[in-house]
Amino acid sequence: MPAEDPGSDHEPAAPRGPDLDEIRRILAAIPGPDLASGTAAAAREPQLLKPPGALGRLEEIAAWMATWQGRHPALVRRPRVCVFAGNHGVAAQGVSAYPASVTAQMVQATLAGQAAINQLCETIDADLRVFELNLDVPTRDFTAAPAMDAEECARAVAYGMMAVESGIDLLCVGELGIANTTTAAALCLALFGGSAADWVGPGTGVAGATLARKAQVAAAGVARHRDAIAAGDAFDALRCVGGLELAAISGAVLAARHARIPVLLDGFVATAAASVLFKADKRALDHCRAAHRSAEPGHDRLLKAIGQAPLFDLGMRLGEATGAALAVPLVRAACACHAGMGTFAEAQVDGPG
């Protein structure tokens, strides 16, 4: 655009923020796999000192990492754990065992090193970053209005994209946010259909009448925005019944794809956020792996919907990227075995007949 005339009486135009059409264009331009690196991994694997397939999914993980890092062998030297925190207007509907104030309190506890994710990141030597998304102003109650307008949603996606910096070689994404399992359930219902009961679970530990109320709220939110959701645009579903931290997670996953950084998805909420990209483009999560199967019942259904097999199942449902962080040593071990093991020829060991 032309430069502003310094002698003009007019105020310079405010810079235009990101919009959802721009996010859609970025998604449409995602790079594919690095086939040369994937082929190199596939060629090395049969030569390693072991029977074919003896390391099970570790072999698949090593190949996946090489394919999406775009180098062979793959390395895990600078993993980053990103925890996105947001508040939800729907919390006022009494869908959680905890008040909305707990989100900000948990952020402070995490910054003070007191949360579970702090201990895990120290153990696995990972860089932990916590990103707050306007905790003083929750999204709107989606049973009454869209949770976010298009600009708010696009800004949150862009904010998540900025969390992905050069030099990271593995990204873990997770969240903090009271009522976000209700939001995730509504988003999954909007994206994949079924009934609210298919997606709603105990979250922070609700049961009985509160759990039933939670399902009613998720169903009411999707019904309220039926026309927008029926259009089939995943980002409109995110805008209507999603949350700021979910939008940011989808942005981080999208930016990681462009930066060739493999991603470990945490539990139900993080996977629901990433599923927005999958719904828009079935290839969009090929650089991701589901770290674990959450005890939140909707997560198993969601993993099947997006074609992901979790790396482990420990009955966890904490969030905070704890499951994703626990998968980092597994990925690191897979890469180390692939890169460091000797071959039959190098060790002068007879191969299979």
Image (cartoon, grey):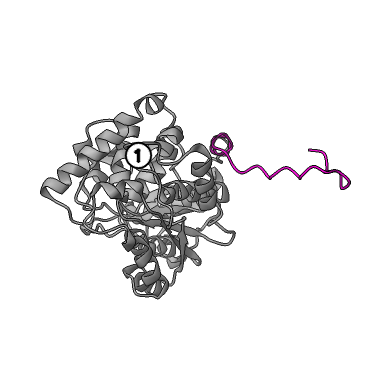
Residue at far left of view:
208
Q: Does the magenta stretch include residue 15?
A: yes
Closest to the observer, 149 or 279: 149
Closest to the observer, 282 or 212: 212
> Residue at horizontal 21%, vertical 53%?
295
Residue stretch rendered in magenta on the structure: 1-27
Closest to the observer, 307 or 265: 265
Q: Residue 50's quadrant in the figure? A: bottom left
Name the side, left or right, on which 109 lies relative to 5. left
Q: Is residue 137 visible?
A: yes
Q: Is residue 43 visible?
A: no
Q: Position of residue 182 (x, y in %)?
A: 28, 46
Q: Does the magenta stretch include residue 133?
A: no
> Residue at horizontal 44%, vertical 39%?
277
Closest to the observer, 289 or 233: 233
- Measured along the vertical axis of the image, is residue 78 above or below residue 246? below
Residue type, numbered disc 1? Phe
- Assign the magenta stretch its main secondary structure: loop
Element marked by disc 1: loop
- Mark 1, Cα crowd under 10 Å, few <14 / some 14-19 / many 20+, is many
Name the side, left or right, on which 20 lies relative to 331. right
Rendered-image quadrant of the N terminus? top right
Q: Where is residue 87 in the image (x, y as percent from the top left)?
A: 38, 53
Q: Where is residue 314 in the image (x, y as percent from the top left)?
A: 22, 59
Where does label 1 land, which residue?
A: 142
> Residue at horizontal 47%, vertical 50%?
248
Q: Residue 103's quadrant in the figure? A: bottom left
Q: Where is residue 342 in the image (x, y as percent from the top left)?
A: 44, 65
